[in-house]
Amino acid sequence: MNYHINDLPERTTKPRNSGITMVMDKGLSLRQAEDFIEVAGMHTDIVKLGWATSFVTPNLQQKLDLYREAGLPVYFGGTLFEAFLVRGQFDDYRRILEKYKMEHVEVSDGSITIEHDEKCEYIRQLSKDHTVISEVGSKDVQKIFAPYKWIKLMQAEIEAGSWKVIAEARESGNVGIYRDSGEVRQGLVDEILTQIPEETIIWEAPQKAQQVWFIKLIGANVSLGNIAPADVIPLETLRLGIRSDTFDHFLGL
């Protein structure tokens, strides 16, 4: 930090197991990625190339190299996994992971329907060679899971080998753990936290109000995902209680 301020909440340090900031790269150019790394790389823990954008991203290998040279793990969005899987190309997908030397992989079923036991088997297979991040919840606003089902799915995926489970919200933040207005389904989150350890969950929270809500509920070291590159620095100030939205929350701690 550039100077000292007393009585700020303690942040975990990289490499973090909690307090993770996962950034969504939806198509940054190489120059934009360089600028992002310069400004926000120190506050970023992992970068996701959103959904299947890696398929059409120019200079993909150079971008992956940029992130890795900056010490930022990077992975392909879960929709790419689903696009291969639904076409019967799982082995091709694994070859893509090998070609690009992907250490992390996302397993999701937000756009396709598969049996959950089958999804867990893919997690088991991929976790032998990769760090698996699995996503729970549908991208379809009409599909609303009961809390017990969220808990059951998350528990099974952690047992199958997921390092973290992502609570689905899309990049817009209006499905899954949120109502279509973007409001948090508070009862759902509370129920999940009675059974699933907080440090195993990355909550997708692309909107500032959502980030504030989770910071106030769980603390500075809640893991948040789908953060826009331009929002990383603002999010870090929210975590530290030096932005008005969380200013009073950490005073006196």
Image: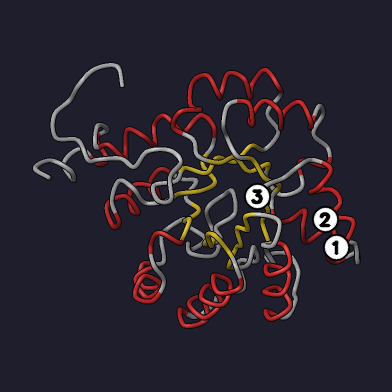
- Asked if residue 95 is positioned above or below residue 197 in the image, the reply reads above
Foreground of the two, 9 or 184: 9
Secondary structure, mark 3, is strand
- Residue 59 position, x and y percent, is 81, 27
| Residue under the point 60% across and 67% down | 161
| Residue under the point 55% across and 24% down | 37
- Residue 200 position, x and y percent, is 45, 61
Foreground of the two, 220 or 132: 132
The type of residue carrying mark 1 is Phe
The type of residue carrying mark 3 is His
Colour theme: secondary structure
Location of the N terminus (image quadrant):
top left
Determine whether, in the image, residue 246 is placed left or right of residue 226. left
Determine whether, in the image, residue 101 is placed left or right of residue 229. right
Q: Which mark is residue 94?
A: 2
Distance Cα–Cα, label 2 vs label 1: 6 Å
Determine whether, in the image, residue 194 is placed left or right of residue 137. left
Q: Which mark is residue 90?
A: 1
Foreground of the two, 14 or 138: 14
Secondary structure, mark 2, is helix
Secondary structure, mark 1, is helix
- Residue 166 position, x and y percent, is 54, 59
Instruction: Give the residue number, with chain letter if any, for mark 3.
Output: 104
Q: Residues within 10 Å of mark 3 (few under 14, many from 20)?
A: many
